[in-house]
Image (cartoon, grey):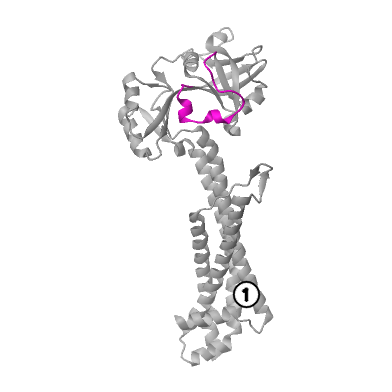
Amino acid sequence: MKFPLYIAKRYLFTKSKSNAINIITIIAAIGVFAGAFSLFIVLSGFSGLRDFSLSFSNEFDPDLKALPQSGKVIKISEDQLNQLQQIEGIEAYSKIAEERVILTYKSKEQPAYIKGVDETYRSVNKIDSSIVFGTWLTDSEPQVVIGNGLSRLLDVGTFNYQNLLKIMVPKPGKGAITMTNLQDAFNSRQTIVSGIYSVNEELDDKYVFTHLNFAKDLLNLAENEYSGIEFKLKPEASESEVSAELNKLFDGKVIIKTRAELNDALNKMLNSENLFVYLIFTLVLTIALFNVVGSIIVMILDKRENIRTLYNLGATPNQIKNIFFLQGMLMTGLGGIIGLAVAVILIILQMNYDLVMITPNLPYPVKMKIENILIVLGTIFTLGLIASYIAAGRSKKALSQANS
């Protein structure tokens, strides 16, 4: 293999007498460089956008969440609550009451979800750090913390005691609602807005936080009834082991979901987008590698006399084929590695110096991942191998023509 490699390097790095061949070779190398460069930049950009998108859900969603296997509520005894504290791996947990409601403020109405949380909720979730106006819930009076989107839709501010926010929820088991018993079909409470939070557009338009007891009273839940329990795990804890312990404790009457499962739709969307973009840029890279095929074929045609000389000196047809195969692989490998190296440097500069900004205060999110480097290298070398093999096959035809 040393002989074909030596000749392949000479052909690649030595200028041809024909300027056209030199130009074609340069164009092919630039195409590989650009393909590797752009593929890594795009993959790193999507990795950054993925983490950026999931960072919002990480602020809101717990590590684990227990939901009822059937129906809308879980019945939890005092004994089970005590046993929860004994499970290794659980750092904190919070009981919640959650239901769809109608918010009414002055003459405006808006559907939303009320989420009643207990006093330990802030140990499980740092949603209070997302407060942009007002304060988190206090015990002084019935209060809610509303999303920024809902506050704009309802035109509601904080601590407006002259105009209270009205929350309405259908009473369970009331059947059909008629015009005469419309008011009787709903439980309703009035409350003050103590704070406005902002996480992302979807959550800001959806959730209203309040005290657990206030929500349970509105929803007519018994003392031991809850919509679910949210858990924060210790850093070294195993999700699968804790989930198994929780299923055992609740006798299989709950569904345990991880943060990834709670955001299953978002994860699938991000994965699909990443896959489609990868396939599109791989197609572009494939088209660019046609230049490599063309460059090698032109080189074979130009070197027909050399091929005959090598053959007469004892080189086998397979060795001659390997010369051009290795030339293609060298061209692809060097172009791909240089393109990847430049892209890595650019991503590092973006991470440290914020070269590209989305807004004056928000740099475009990127992330350096070994996985993306391996994907680019694997794609480049796989496509380069196929292109080089196809092009090198022309050498045998050129050899037969040279000997005829």
Q: Is residue 65 positioned above or below 107 on the image?
A: below
Quadrant, the C terminus: bottom right
Tell me where residue 253 sits by quadrant: top left
- Residue 113 seen in the current view: yes
Furthest residue in direction top, as rendered? 180
Q: Residue at x 52, y 72 (%)?
A: 329
Tell me where residue 291 sits by quadrant: bottom right
Query: How far across and how far down the image is residue 121, in percent?
Result: 47, 26
Q: Residue at x 62, y 63 (%)?
A: 34
For the record, the magenta segment spans 117-141
Residue under label 1, please give it.
Answer: 25
Q: Is residue 243 positioned above or below 1 on the image?
A: above
Query: How far across and how far down the image is residue 352, in percent?
Result: 60, 51
Quadrant, the N terminus: bottom left
Tell me where residue 91 sits by quadrant: top left
Query: How far across and how far down the image is residue 397, in percent?
Result: 53, 82
